[in-house]
Amino acid sequence: MAEKNKLQYKFLFIISTAYLAVDINMQGFLALMPFVREEFALSSSRAGLYSSSYFFLATAVAIFSGRIVDQIGSKTGIVVGTISIGVLMLLHAVSPNFTLILILALLIGLFFSIITPALNKAVMQRTLPENRATSMGVMQMGGGIGGFTGAVFLPYLGEQFGWRTAVVFSALIALLVGVFIIIFFNEKSSEAGSDGVVRRQQISFKESITALFKNKDLLLFSLFGLLLGFNSGAVPAHYTLYLTQDAFLSRTAAGFAFGLLQIGGILGRPLMGYLNDKFLDGSRPKGLMAVGLFLTLVMFYYYRFMSGFDLSLQTIYLSSFVIGFASLGWMGIYFTAVIELSGEELAGIGTGLSLVFVRLGVLLSPPLFGLLADLNNSYQLSWLVMGLLTGISTLVFTYVYKDNF
């Protein structure tokens, strides 16, 4: 019990490397897309199919992947997912055409869908509620750091040695991380023991799904995840376009601001979790209500001030950090709520269910956010609608959980 009550930095570092490896490859390959587009003479719409292919299958199989994790355990799920992604990225590097790369992206989405439930389940089993959101946020920092590193470093390697060599480099990182986790991540006996295996086998997939859909709190939190996915999908997808089009920043300045947005998201994950654990009595409804209100204020700030006044470059940079903190920093609190509502035995499949809603938001919001900008010839309407949607959803969520405050 005492071990669980402490923040286990060694354990969190070990498992966070899986997120780091995955996001180095995902965000890094997206950053390499100009090189890929040039080699295969792709249109913009065809190039954009890569991200859609990746998230399509990851979303479609999320619940089934969560179920698999509940059966095979967190360590096996992390190792299989990470090593498989490394192998598939190596195949990217030798692909003769873009069609094959799209097929590989589908398969990567399949294995990526295993990693998040496996990591969440590991955190559920090794922590207590007193520091669980903080632990979840610290673990998820690996993804933010990996995405930032891949987006910055892989294009440099692409310029120097070609995009295929850069992809080989990132793929090898994933393979090495898989081996690292095999060696250093020790599962608890409660998960790996024969009793645990028997319990998982006794609960069928149908029974697991029935139990989740009877859990009204979990369904409501998952619906709120759709809203959070809307924010985390639309903001990064359009941020540099917004800054260059509406704020008249240079591409270099907009790129730096985007980097600050990512840093805000990296730091937001553990800090939001810490604030929830220490200052909101570990109440996940209170934590997500605070996230929703904060997001609402940030969206209205961008609508009213960022889009209405000629602000200094320093103010824009600070605002970029804040919007990254708000739009990407909620993941620790959210997934902590999901695994606690699901329970240890169904933490994997519960995570899968919630990911369906989050990823739907990530998939749907960028085109809708951009459509509003096209209709208004600026992003001001986009910020306003996002602020209204976030605010109304947060008020509804707060009303439903008013007895928990």
Image (cartoon, helix red, strand yellow):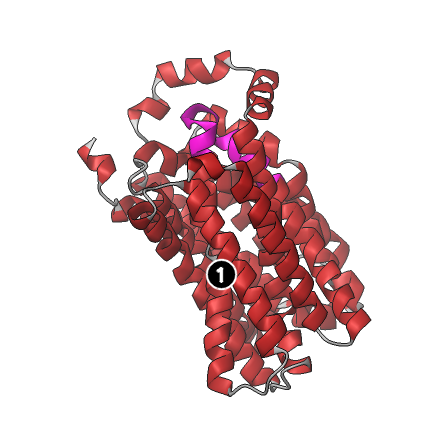
Left or right: residue 143 versus residue 27 is left
Helix, strand or loop for disc 1: helix
Q: Is residue 147 above or below residue 184?
A: below
- The quadrant of the rendering that contains the C terminus is top left
For the point 32% across and 23% down, the residue is 190
Nearer-the-camera pick, 340 or 262: 340
User: In this picture, is 229 found above or below 296?
Assistant: above
Residue 157 in percent (x, y) is at 52, 73
Binning the other alpha carbons within 10 Å of mark 1 as few (below 14), some (14 to 19) or many (20 upward) gives: many
Point 69% across, 56% down: residue:
365
Q: Nearer the viewer, residue 28 or 327?
A: 327
In the picture provided, is 275 more to the left or to the right than 112? left
Q: Please identify the dominant SS of the magenta region.
A: helix
Q: Is residue 361 visible?
A: yes
**Residue 237 in the image: above or below residue 317:** above
Magenta-colored span? 339-356
In this view of the protein, can residue 160 be seen by the observer? no
Query: What residue is shown at x 44% (from left), y 67% (from top)?
Result: 263
229 to the left or right of 24: right
Q: Position of residue 93 (x, y in %)?
A: 61, 59
The x and y percentages for residue 283 are 38, 41
* Amino acid type of the residue that numbered disc 1 sits on in the rendered structure: Ala
The residue that label 1 is drawn on is 326
The image quarter containing residue 39 is bottom right
Question: Percent x, y for residue 48?
Answer: 73, 61
